[in-house]
Amino acid sequence: MGIKLKFNNIQKHFFGVTALDGVSFEIEEKHTVGLIGENGAGKSTLMNILGGVLLPDGGNMSLDGDAYLPSNPRDAAQRGVAFIHQELNLFTNLSIAENIYINSFPSLKKTPLIDKKKMNDSLKSLLKSLDLNYSPSTTVENLAPGERQLVEIAKALHSDAFLIIFDEPTTSLTARETEKLFTILDQLRSEGRTIIYISHILGEVKRITDDVIVLRDGKVTGNSETGLIEIPEMINQMVGRESDNLFPERSAKPKDSPILEVKSLSQPGIVGNVDFSVHEGEVLGVFGLMGSGRTEMARMLFGVDTYRSGSISIDGTPLPRNSPQSSIERGMAFVTENRREEGLLMNVAITENIGLVSLPDYCRNLVKWVDAKRMNEEAGIIGDSLKLKASDIRRQPAMSLSGGNQQKVVIGKWLMTKPRLLIMDEPTRGIDVGAKYEVYSIMDRLAADNSGILFISSEVEELIGIADRIVVMSQGEVVKVFEKKDFDVTALMAAAFREAVA
Amino acid sequence: MSKVDQLNTGRVGNVKILGRKILLSEFFVLYLTVFYLLVLFPFIPRVFSPYNIKNVLSNTWPLLVIAIGQTFVLITAGIDLSQTSVMALSSIFGAVIMTSEADPALLSKSPLWGIMLSDKGGLFAGTSAALPVGLLVMMAIGIMIGLINGFSVAKLRMPPFIVTLVSQMFFAAVAIWLSKSENIRHLPESFSRLGRGNFGPIPIALIIAVIIAVSAHLLMSRTLYGRRLYATGINPRAARISGVPTTKIIIAAYALSGFCAAVGGILYSARLEQGRPTLGNTLLLDIIGANVIGGISLAGGKGKVLWTVFGVVFFIFLSNTLNLLNLKFFVIDIVKGLVILLAAILDVVRSQLALRYSGGKV
Amino acid sequence: MKDRNWQRFILKNTTFILFVLLFLIFGILAPRFLSFKNLEIILSNSSYIGIIAVGMTFVLLTGGIDLSVGSTMYLSAVSSGTLIAAGWPIAPTIAVSLLIGIAMGYVNALIITRLKIVPFLATLVTMTVGRGMGLFVTKSVQVDFPDSITLMSTVKVFGFIPLQIFIFGLVVILAMVFLRLTKSGRQLYAVGNDPLAAERAGIQTRPLITSTYVISGFFAALGGFISITQIGRVSAGFGSGDEFDAIAAAVLGGASLMGGVGSVFPGTVLGTVMIQMIQAGLVYTAVDIYLHPIVMSLIIFFAVLLDSVRTGQLKKMERRTIMKITS
């Protein structure tokens, strides 16, 4: 019973970016271990390696002293390791029992038929032990998110997993469901299973774990018994990363006149009563952890998604709902967090990508003839000003660029519209230091030209480095607004984690 | 030139590079057509006779117009199976408006009898307004059906395949119902001239087809609509965030497809000198096939009018030469099918090659 | 919350509700419609297209489509006709025609899974080539079948079930058992629900997808044979357009073109019978025969529209929440 796990000098790089840099630690058997760190600290990468989703570039792992290197999730399952992802991996059109047995259906005597009775009966006590009061033949589609999570847990238990990884298990659960999950975690522990618990909610970590491992920039920065460490100390170990980001000096101060005013923006289950404003020449930082509702809020502002109540206005005039087109006409711009899916036309030339939003400005007469020559020239100028590294920006497709240069194309496409308000959602994610600096400089330049910038990030250091004020969001609500003089890493983190700072 | 090319000195290397260039060229299908004809020429010298060329060309114009309409929809990653019914329905309506004489024995059971149709002919029988009104109504029908398709796909979010399949069944049935399966004859001379007549030495159908092809080409490659059409086909989510009104773009693509099908219906009806309720009902394979051979991707975002032109030309020459070889129609169908399959396979290969040789890292 | 459950119920059972409504309407307008004889005719007419629609359901479940079934019917039917004319006994003839169906399905599967051609295009090609090959065999001459074949349609199994209905029933039961009770059947649903997750879970997707096209080809050949026993001859247009009827029946029965959703029973069976019922009902209520396909396509459009509304609604209900719900 129970598994003793050992990581030894694990290394992992993605496209030249270091995700894990020599991670070593041990997990005692029958322990529940909290794994914490900022977004991008390497938690998911490490767990994906443990769960057989990724292979490490270096280092080794052992389970109970035996070498362990799963090449796929099934390998991991056979060694007793189960990974419950944040995005559940269930077939919604199948029953609970079928999801659990998807690759190991019991057959009826010697026929090719499934022994449904045996299958369902074998799970009844398991489901009951998880307090999931449904028949095993219930279709997953009919279950609430929290109940689906329990199905995932049942899957892990059924495959005799003795090391179970939970990745942010409570983000989509109600308070009551969360309590239930904790009871089950206690029960699993008492059965002698080892649990790794990843969470942003430090109170939960404090409450249910035996040990806490802290990751920062792909390295272990803390490893202690939970009883011996308080929440502020956890936060200290998570932040204070060696800041390799340099920030340009801000060249102008924000003005008093507001551009964007958001009043009690609400959408049930997503965001509630969000209020804030962005002024001329201001870089307003929005800090929040993944799943805090910041991206959803940005999408509502820009008109990609709809909202139930509240108002959004630009320069004092309300903005129509659900129309990115009119948002653009009113001078808004939106750099989305996922440039691949929502930012770029991957196999289209760079200049055409840059010109896409401004196309109407380069049209003549009734048939909307595009003045391609002028557009390409101006897109070229934008490209140059962004120091885009490409050999032929009129022919080369966007997909041939590096991540940082792709991001510059997305930003360039919005700069070409001379935006009044630029929303940037995680604009520096996955790009190198030099490109980051250039992105910050662009923000500064725009702000100096009296535009407003809404800068969403989960890296608190960069917000402190460039923003004029920072709005902290958590669970769909604005928790606190920090003025520049009050900027403090620990205080910001604490607000985002909704923890009272001692 | 890239390093790879420089390294490949020697004849083998050169042949390889040339092969790759031809394979990846825009004009690949055209080269293929020429090559195909040159190979077949010794066996069927008639293929280049003036009569045959004229015949081939007269078959090309209507199909070209219709296939170009389909190209618009394919670029949005949709499909329009209803084009054939657009042809049929507009053919019937055009005839009902223009015909100068209707046989009660055949048509008195039509629901339009007594309303739009009588033994004295259609609504505008014999008047000079017959032709313009007839043409306008035919085109309007195409656009209207296209708008219905587009609305269902873009607004109601129904799958294009089933939407256009159902509208194909529906409007084909309406055409047959309105005409009680009878062809409507006695169309004005001015109308049939569109299909058979010449303007000077040039066939009128050619002029119409060229006008449509050139306008479609300019629309796709030079205008705001065209750019937005590709953006919608390549990545609808990114396009929407970039301010592209994707719903309108898609609806317009289906409307254009319907319009082109109606114009194709005009050309065919004019050539046959009748309104025919089954017009075009065997044409779907040719329309889709010509597009696929031309290299238009069913996955959306990829295609040009020029490619469609080449695809249609190849397809027509293929049918024509197989006819000249005195092959039975079913053998011709088999060959056509296999050629479309080969084209689809080739397209998979070409895209992989193109990716390898153009998308290299900086 | 109760309202939602109601909504869900209606959204999930649109076909059944539509079926009952239409049945009642026709019954009221034309009481003879409800006669036992008429109901038997409806079932009997449903058999051959129903068998093909069952095969189509398998393909649709994985998110594919099979346009070639009409041509498969034709090719296997004319092959058996030719063999019978050449003096072959009936049993091996049937076996050969079914094998041809399997072969057609396998070819489709190869083109789709190995050459990576989209199902629509792949089966559009085999549809054309298959019919061409059939016409090649017959030289486009009509093929007539001897009485030994046509008499089969009058056979009553157990003395009261017409043979075609019996075979249809058998096919439905087998398909149902396969889809509901076997490992492959359940995995098929998993593949249609989320192909990537299915591969991650270690499901062998390629053989599963291959099997659906083989099954579709087999049932197309079988359906073709049933049809021959009823009409006794095969003309050049035999089976042409039946692919669309089969798709319509499956879609009407709730199968989604996106895969993962659909059932043989009640789904596709209900869809098939509904189509035949509407046709019979229109005859009984003396609606102009030219209007039949118009009414039919309107009903299918309506069903598909409801399906897309349903999918949208169900998706909305599944959206994850961010805010803490304190309950």
Image: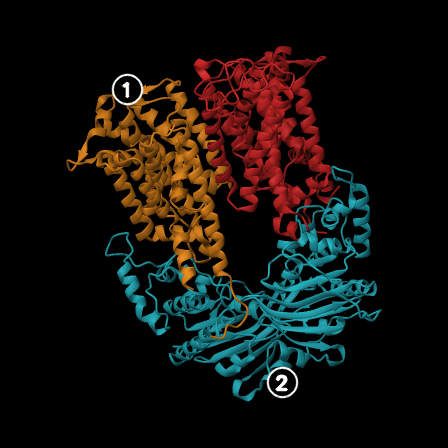
Chain colours: A cyan, B red, C orange
Chain identifier of the residue bearing label 1 in the image: C
* Residue B359: % across, % down: 67, 47
Query: What residue does disc 2 label?
Result: A501
* Residue at image location 62% in from the left, 54% down from the top: A341
Q: Is residue A225 above or below residue C83?
A: below
* Residue at image location 29% in from the left, 39% down from the top: C27
Query: What residue does disc 1 label?
Result: C85
Closest to the observer, B89 or C136: B89
Disc ID at residue A324: none
* Residue at image location 64% in from the left, 51% down from the top: B240
Under tag 1, what secondary structure?
helix
Q: Is residue B296 above or below residue A420?
A: above
**Rendered image quadrant of residue C216:** top left
Task: Tell me the amino acid under the disc marked 1.
Answer: Ala
Of all residues shown, which one is farthest toward the right?
A251
Task: Tell me the amino acid under the disc marked 2.
Answer: Val
* Residue at image location 72% in from the left, 58% down from the top: A332
Question: Can residue A93 be seen in this snapshot?
Answer: no
